[in-house]
Amino acid sequence: MTFESLSTDEIQSLHSAQEEAYARLQAAGLTLDLTRGKPSPEQLDLSGDLLTEPGPDFRDGAGTDTRNYGGIAGNADLRATFAEIMQVPVDQVVAGDNASLAIMHDLVAFSLLKGTVSSPRPWSAEDEVVFICPAPGYDRHFAICEQYGIRMETVDMFEDGPDMDAVRELVQDPAVKGMWIVPTYANPTGAVVSEAVAQELATMETAAPDFRILWDNAYAVHHLTEQRTRTADILGLCEEAGHPDRPFVLASTSKITFAGSGVSFLGASADNIAWYTRLLGKRTIGPDKVNHLRHARFLPDVEAVHAHMDRHREILAPKFEAVLEILRDRLGGHDVATWTEPRGGYFVSLDVPDGTASHVVRLAKGAGIALTPAGASFPRGEDPRDRNIRIAPSFPSMDDLRAAMDGLATCVLLAASEQHLAS
Ligand code: PLP
């Protein structure tokens, strides 16, 4: 039963039913929140042992007193584990403080102020700097560009990565210096960059000699099924293609251990790492090595990381299943919305009829359900079709999640039927 196949009377009665459902929702006085892409308390409890580490044994594997200054590259054992996950040689991986976002910010700020190893001049000395922004994408990537006056060129994010026809055309412009990409279980669509797309990103010729890919692998091991999707080896591909300095590879334990007290990682060519640590060394004498040590003990190898992520999956997968089940049950028959069915990561991306996403978010707010603002996943917060809504299932309890999703479905149907009747 699609809207197209319904008579005006039938749509009118569907609309009345949704109005009644919406009035019941409002009367229920809900306070629900689908905005927070962060781990739930039960997930954080999985890493509770970190709170008792390192204890009195505060020396790392090399015998260094972790309480003191120094060691800009970070704990060697922890770097070895994440080097394997990031597919970067351990000597080319730096472990930082609690946020990979901070590293990304610094990479952009350093490039603007000082230029990269292959820049003829600092990016800020160029007439204009442009970044390619696959969308929908991660709002904080776009916020960094906005903050520093970097013009954003939006390209579509498909299931296998960014629209490469658009990317190939954009990189002909020497002002295009960089590109954001979340290669595995992208925020918010769950897309995974295929080997073929990664190969194209590595081999394409760019007019800027210092073009950079910020390969933000925030969800590298965050599988929702038993299939452990392997991220393409962007550094290896770029090296083979003769562009070893093109990628900056990012990762963090924010959604592995504690979101606010994890460890971040940067992997890149030896030259890029030397450049980064030289500039970083002016900003800090070294990272939080006590935190590194407790993480190195808690996650001693890659298998330990995978085993730990399996426990996250046990908590997260049923929540994603509940979201998809409610979307299918409530919206499936009406042909008014499409949504992603991610195999990992933290989000479900919902597309409602063009021109109704902001209205759906307003309706949900009116019923006590907080949704991420419509358009948040697009540069400048502007979704050109006003259709995308990001759903974050991880934080609410199962009961709250089900109630919020059911309410959201009512709002989608109400907005869609209103629009149909008005047209
Ligand atoms: N990158 C992506 C794609 C994210 O979705 C997030 C958090 O939502 C982050 C980075 C933040 O990572 P961190 O906590 O390491 O700064």
Image: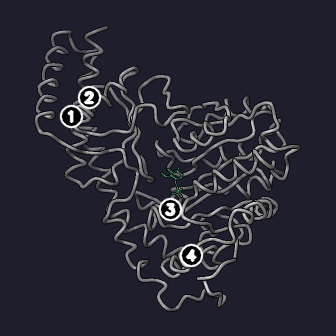
How far across and down, in percent of the image, does residue 252 sit? Answer: 55, 62
Q: Amino acid at mark 1?
A: Ala
Q: What separation in Å lies between label 4 and label 1 (alpha carbons)? A: 44 Å
Render colour scheme: one colour
Judged from this view, the residue extending furthest toward the right is: 120
The amino acid beneath tag 4 is His
Label 3 near label 2: C-beta < 8 Å? no
| Chain-order first, disc 1 or disc 3 | 3
Q: Which residue is mark 1?
A: 367
Task: Classify mark 3: residues with Cα within 10 Å, few (<14), some (14-19) or many (20+).
Answer: many
Local SS, label 3:
loop
Residue kind at label 2, given as amino acid type: Leu
Question: Where is 386 relative to 63, above or below?
Answer: above
Residue topped by disc 2: 363
Disc 2 or 3, which lies upstream in sequence?
Answer: 3
Q: Mark 1 and mark 2: span between their CA atoms? A: 7 Å
Q: Earlier in the sequence, mark 4 or mark 1?
A: 4
**Image coordinates for residue 46, horizontal then vertical, percent:** 36, 72
